Image (cartoon, rainbow, N blue to C red):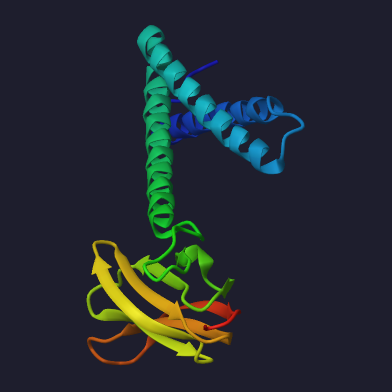
Amino acid sequence: MQAPSGEAGTLALSVGALAAGAVAGATVGAAGVNGASSDAKHQAAVAGGLVGVLATGFGGLLVEEFSPKWANVGSRTALIGVGAITLAAAFGVAKSLTSFRSGLQQAPQLSSPNASGGTAYTAGSVDNGRTLTMAPGDTITVSLATPPDGQSWMWATSGGVVAYTAHTVSGVADVSTFTANTPGSGQLVGTRTQTTPATGQALETFTINVNVVGSTS
């Protein structure tokens, strides 16, 4: 078999070899977790595919070193393989950072008693739309990502069951605290709004439904 003489043929053969390695690795990875959930199989297939690309790229280096006739194919295979692995790693890091930031925003739903003896609840962006049952004197602290310059979180309450009692901004967190005061049902609605220029445009909405039960005495 003759090695391709043109750049297009060399690239096509290199990409084909890497694709074959990825498919083989993904097949082996998925087969290794046979009987697991679909998510687990997907993750195993992705990991196997990356290993297949890495192994094929390493094989390209060996071809470049020991087979002069196929050296161009080997070097292109290794180069493209390294590029693919680098992109996959960059994507993984970006995804991990997103998960980490989300984790910072997601606090436990129930924490220690507050200063007034009630229960201190906390919520983050993942709690958007949830329903919370509180007692008079309980507090809920909502921690959301700090808006970019020129934007602010604007809060409104309905039903008269909770009062807006505190607000702080620290680093990546915009923190607002509300206190339950009257039995009934209502909502906390936060709207990320464009303030500079003051267009009033609503860019994002965060809502928690609140049911306050129990006596105020």
Q: Residue at x 37, y 23 (%)?
A: 75
- Give the image location of residue 113, x and y in percent: 44, 62
Observer-nearest residue: 80 or 66? Answer: 80
Q: Residue at left 54%, top 91%?
A: 159
72 left or right of 20 in image? left
The image shows residue 7, relative to residue 143, as above or below, that is above
Q: State whether residue 163 is above or below residue 146.
A: below
- The picture quadrant where one finds residue 69 is top left
Residue closest to the eye, 6 or 122:
122
Viewer can see residue 166: yes
- Closer to the camera, 96 or 58? 96
Q: In the rendered picture of this protein, how many numbered marks are placed on residues?
A: 0
Q: Answer with left or right where residue 145 lies relative to residue 24.
A: left
In the image: residue 68, left or right of residue 44: left
Q: Residue furthest top?
A: 66
- Residue 121 placed where, x, y %? 47, 65
Give the vertical position of 158 relative to 209 (above or below): below
Quarter holding residue 198: bottom left
Residue under the image location 77 percent in, 32 percent down: 35
